[in-house]
Image (spheres, grey):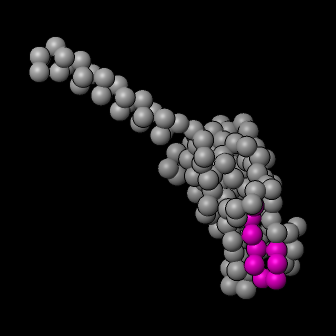
Amino acid sequence: MERRKFISNVGITFALACAGGLAACSKGGSDDDPGGGGGGGTTPKLTVDLASQLTTPGDFTIGGGVILIRTAAGNTAASFSALSSTCTHQGCTLSTYNSGSAQIECNAPCGHGSRYSNTGAVVTGPATAALSKYTVEINGTTLTVK
């Protein structure tokens, strides 16, 4: 094979590999749904057994792209807040819920300090957009976030 043709073939192969890699990394199909308003999906984002988890107001869990907070006693949908766990400022996963201040905190790994209320509203920036809300359904002691 001629050197010029070999280099051309290597270049074409490299360009195709890069294009495929960019397509694989493009936004879309994320399970976290960071910016699009939640609720209504058929695949549960998070399922919790209320007999053993989130038994006390202030308890929370983060998983499946969701931060789920028990805001009141009783096993009704109104006793819970289900929000996107993706910070609207830098896209990192929110780290904790402070039940004393009733605020969701983005402290790690970004470390920028945005805080949100337990309804998803921005309390302290630099974030400027609220967290997306998800639908909570309860059947017996099983809570499902959709």
Q: Residue at x 75, y 78 (%)?
A: 142
Dividing the image into 4 quarters, which one contains the C terminus? bottom right
Q: What segment carries the magenta color? A: 138-146
Asked if residue 108 shows in the view, the reply is yes
* Image location (x, y in percent) of residue 71: 80, 68
Q: How many marks?
A: 0
* Image location (x, y in percent) of residue 80: 80, 67
Q: Is residue 123 magenta?
A: no
* Image location (x, y in percent) of residue 37: 77, 46
Near-viewer residue (126 or 11): 11
Q: Is residue 139 magenta?
A: yes
Dividing the image into 4 quarters, which one contains the N terminus? top left
Asked if residue 113 shows in the view, the reply is no
Q: Residue furthest bottom?
A: 51
Q: Residue furthest top?
A: 4
Judge whether 58 appears above or below 142 on screen.
above
Judge whether 130 appears above or below 77 on screen.
above
* Image location (x, y in percent) of residue 132: 75, 48
What secondary structure is the stretch in magenta mostly built from? strand
Q: For this view, does 29 lie left or right of residue 117?
A: left
Q: Residue at x 16, y 13 (%)?
A: 4
Near-viewer residue (145 or 122): 145
